[in-house]
Amino acid sequence: MTISKGPQVFPRTEYLRRLAAVKSEMVKREIEALVVTFDRSINYLTGYTARSAYVPQALVISVHEEEPTFILRLMDVPAAIHLTFLERNRIIGYPEALIGNPEKDGYDAVIDFLQEANFATRGIGLELGQLPARAANNFQARLPSARIVDCTHVVTWIRTIKSDLEITLMREAAAIADAGMMRAADVIRPGVHEADAIAEILSTLARGANGKHGTGIANIFMCSSPRAGTSHITWSDDVFRQGSQINLELGGVRHTYTAAVMRTFSIGKPSDRLRRLHEAEVAGLEAALDKVRPGATCNDVAQAFNRTIEKLGFQKESRCGYGIGIDWNEAVTSLKEGDMTVLKPNMTFHLMLGNWLDEDFGYVLSETFRVTDSGADVLTRVPRQIFEI
């Protein structure tokens, strides 16, 4: 028996469109083969979602061939056949002997393929920022006649502008995120264990919204008193208490496409300081969204937020957000002053307004939005309030 193709998230034409955009960039850089090792970009170009990137794997794109070749661990070949649009002969499994081997690893199988495919003397693009140093050195040593070009962010930049099919998944993910946050408002109560609340939230994120299931669980951060000044910690063994503040960040996931949202909860009346910060952040959020339009820059959006909250007596040291899409963060754009990236239609961002003022005091508010010809299309719809329990 052989494994069958599973339902494809996108049609073949969508993947070929993405590959054509990559090949266009390859031509500009005068490379004939691009070795993609970043798992999020492999997902983008093939539909592969299995979590096997803890060992070497690579997608080799040739400017001369329609489909790329996927080289990965032999035990993961059935998953690649099932999940991707690729023909079986485009999926190559390397042997288990390359796992846990101090002398050779799966990247050697990729290099072998490049040599056999006559790329050893051609221009080859590598995502050097994603490769371990040893692997990068190995490519250089074993392909001494090749012209190695750093293509670390080539695919990520292409990913920043979504197709309408991708935007549909982002909307579905946003609805799931909203459902998770509203479930949090139902279950956060004095005396409830944080873990029990998280269990309810996670089950909602998995069950999904509007008939669309969550197909993964993104990072979830619950920073509660006395940890409200932290940003990236998970739930604890503790219980919620009267007077507690809870800062919650979560995301909905549809076929790896992720939409994030953050809100602040207060068990009991919020402090005056928290209330004033909330009002400033909401005003800043609205000012930032008002700046969103094609032709504006990430810098423009960040300045609008920063100047607004400064007038209200607050500052935010960290950036205001970043590109979001596959698996949360697109690492090439930041909503911060000095980032002159020009906004284009169907870019998507997490406008992340977490603000940590002291070691024991912080606040969170965020939205996921899409750039449109007429401005910002906010995908998440949770009320912009402190949830007072």
Image (cartoon, grey):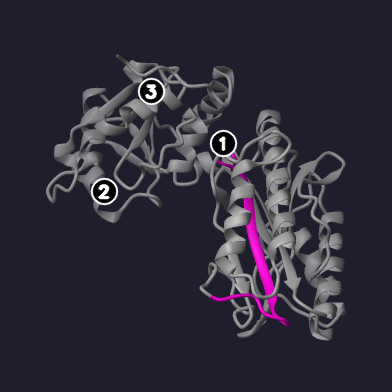
Kindly identify which residue carries mark 3: 81
The amino acid at mark 1 is His
Alpha carbon distance from label 2 to label 3: 26 Å
The residue drawn where x is 59% and y is 44% is 206
Q: Is residue 32 visible?
A: no
Relative to 121, residue 283 above or below: below
- Identity of the residue furthest to the top in this view: 1
Of mark 2 and mark 3, the one earlier in the sequence is 3
Task: Check contact, mark 2 vs mark 3: CB within 8 A.
Answer: no
Query: Along the line of sight, which residue is nearer the eye, 337 or 260?
Result: 260
User: The residue tagged with tag 1: helix, strand or loop?
Assistant: loop
Q: Amino acid at mark 3?
A: Ile
Query: How far across and down, in percent of the image, does residue 11 sit?
Result: 58, 19
Label 1 crowd (10 A; few <14 / some 14-19 / many >=20): many
For disc 2, the marked residue is 135
In the image, residue 226 lies in the stretch drawn in magenta: no
Identified by mark 2, the residue type is: Ala
Magenta range: 238-257
Please tell me which residue lies in front, 104 or 210. Answer: 210
Q: Residue at x 75, y 78 (%)?
A: 315
Residue, disc 1: 255
Distance of mark 1 from mark 2, alpha carbons?
A: 30 Å
Residue 299 occupies quadrant? bottom right
In which quadrant of the rendered image does the N terminus lie? top left
**Residue 117 horizontal side relative to residue 130, left or right:** left
Q: CA distance from mark 3 to mark 1?
A: 17 Å
- State whether residue 242 is above or below residue 173: below
Among numbered discs 1 and 2, the one appearing first in the sequence: 2
